[in-house]
Image (spheres, coloured by chain):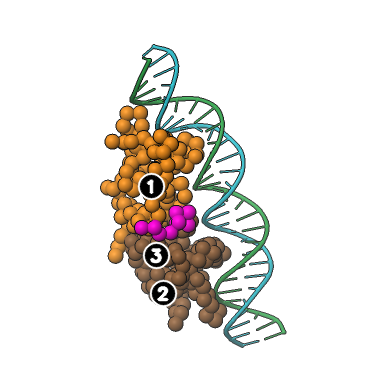
Chain colours: A orange, B brown, C green, D cyan
DNA sequence: TGCTTATATAAGTAAATTATTATATAGTTA
DNA sequence: TAACTATATAATAATTTACTTATATAAGCA
């Protein structure tokens, strides 16, 4: 099997090598999240969240879509990295309970 | 699917997020390599190679086995991280040409 | 035994990373 | 339009990383 270049794969792994970013990606595996949801979930400053998302976006791992005042982030399934990403994410435990928690708090932004 | 804890997965990804370490792991996917082979392949200082191997060893991703004066490193297939590792490595291009090059140079240490 | 080779560790350093606070931008709404 | 909300960017500081050189350890061999 030939697959991606090893250098690019290392860049992807490095980006996934942060607990916050890895959890973000697992969270948006099925449905997009917006920045303020991440801020709520991770209890981190908004700039910090934005900077993590920027790294993922710069690497084309995620894409953004504005909906009114919110910007939703989702996995970029067109990315050359998507197969690698997918095979990593499918080995991670579900993070949906974090979204359930948001719903309970009333801080979930429904994107549809 | 439940899989590994996300924090541990992030640690593994971070370790794989370095071109040298990722290539090392792909190289030893099939057969062990010793430190001096890595030094030759990567054209890096011996301490630098040893330090990369140490990180992988500390995380139980690789194991070492002394054979005479050489210490051979191989994937630790007993590791809880092995399934994740394997699914990443199988998406990487073969690095065997690097070993072929060693054979041509006469610097390949045959371990068996 | 002493010398050589292979590897590991220690100490130091430059660069990269990940947070923070402050500020800018852009859309929403009164 | 002004005020508000969501997000991005800039500047900065603390921490971590990945090298380097110097040195220690451990096995093989004369």
Q: Which mark is residue A30?
A: none
User: Dot 2: within a 10 Å radius of its alpha carbon, few (fewer than 14), some, or many (20 or more) residues?
Assistant: some
**Residue under label 2:** B31
Relative to residue C17, is residue A3 depicted above or below? below
Q: Earlier in the sequence, mark 2 or mark 3?
A: 2
**Residue under label 1:** A96
Q: Is residue B74 visible?
A: yes
Q: Per the image, is B5 magenta?
A: yes
* Residue B76, image x, y percentages: 46, 70
Start-end of magenta stretch: B1-10
User: Dot 1: within a 10 Å radius of its alpha carbon, few (fewer than 14), some, or many (20 or more) residues?
Assistant: few
Q: Secondary structure at mark 1?
A: helix
Horizontally, residue A87 falls left or right of residue B79, namely: left
Given residues B42 and A84, the one toward you in this image is A84
Q: Quadrant of residue A112?
A: top left
Give the residue displayed 47% in from the left and 35% down from the top: A46
Write down the chain letter for disc 2: B
* Residue B88, image x, y percentages: 37, 61
Q: Nearer the viewer, mark 2 or mark 3?
A: 3
**Residue under label 3:** B83
Where the N terminus of chain B falls, by quadrant?
bottom left
Given residues A37 and D29, the one toward you in this image is A37
Give the residue displayed 30% in from the left and 60% down from the top: A3
Relative to residue B108, is residue D30 depicted above or below? below
Q: CA distance from mark 2 to mark 3?
A: 18 Å
Q: Are marks 1 and 2 on the same chain?
A: no
Q: Secondary structure at mark 2?
A: loop
Relative to residue B87, is residue B112 depicted above or below? below
Q: CA distance from mark 1 to mark 2?
A: 40 Å
Q: Per the image, is A67 magenta?
A: no
* Residue B30, image x, y percentages: 39, 73
């Amino acid at each position: 099997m030939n697959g991606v270049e090893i250098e690019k794969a290392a860049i992807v792994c490095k980006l996934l090598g942060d607990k916050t970013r890895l959890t973000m990606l697992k969270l948006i595996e099925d449905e997009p999240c917006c920045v303020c949801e991440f801020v709520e979930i991770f209890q981190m400053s908004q700039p910090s969240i934005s900077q993590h998302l920027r790294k993922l976006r710069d690497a084309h791992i995620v894409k953004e879509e504005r909906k009114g005042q919110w910007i939703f982030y989702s996995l970029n399934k067109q990315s050359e990295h998507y197969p690698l990403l997918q095979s990593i994410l499918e080995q991670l435990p579900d993070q949906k309970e974090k979204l359930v928690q948001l719903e309970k708090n009333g801080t979930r932004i429904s994107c549809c």
